[in-house]
Image: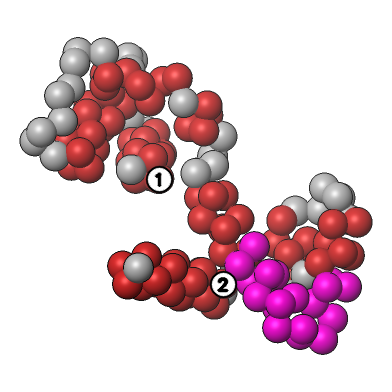
Amino acid sequence: MFAEFEKEAHKLVGNTIIIDSSEEFSSIYKGLLEKYFGPDFEMDDKVIYEWSRIPHFYRGFYVYQYATGFASSVAIGKAILENKQGALEGYIEMLKSGSSDYSIPLLKKAGVDITTSKPILDALDVFEELLNKFESD
């Protein structure tokens, strides 16, 4: 929901529409609350302004970092657990680099190319495995 809000808010701003109040953003947020929580969700008159207090929205597409961070972690962990040659060393090299570069080149040091769909698809496979295990228990 947050990712969709960010996408719609950026689209609104990107269309060079003059935004003279928070009402446009609140309207988007209200629609998403209705979409994601359904008709049983009791919405008071203040919840539509919740978007304004969420710091994630003040940093461009921050919520996507959760998904890419999880996918990257799965890829690194899987490579290490499977004893893939150079995986542990690459991970340590990435950690040693600190914040000396942007995320994409740092992750490549650890053997993860987040510009492809592979890490995301692998993370979804892990999620599916966990969900299947949960449902079978």
Q: CA distance from mark 1 to mark 2?
A: 19 Å
**In the rendered image, the vertical position of residue 133 relative to residue 3, given as above or below:** below
Task: Name the quadrant of the N terminus.
Answer: top left
- Residue 126 appears at what percent x and percent y? 49, 72
Q: Position of residue 105 (x, y in %)?
A: 76, 64
Tally of numbered tags? 2
Numbered label attached to residue 3 = 1
| Residue linked to disc 2 | 119
Type of amino acid under label 2: Pro
- Viewer-proximal residue, 28 or 86? 86
Write the start and end of the magenta stretch as one range: 73-90
36 part of magenta stretch: no
Q: Is residue 64 visible?
A: yes
Question: Mark 1: few, some, or many residues within 10 Å (few <14, many ≥20)?
Answer: some
Q: Residue at x 57, y 58 (%)?
A: 70
Q: Secondary structure at mark 1?
A: helix
| Mark 2 secondary-structure assignment | helix
- Front residue of 37/28: it is 37
Camera-nearest residue between 136 and 92? 136
Label 2 CA crowd tier, 10 Å (few <14, some 14–19, many 20+): many
Above or below 62: residue 45 = above
Examine the rendering and report whether any part of residue 11 can be seen: no
- The amino acid pointed to by label 1 is Ala
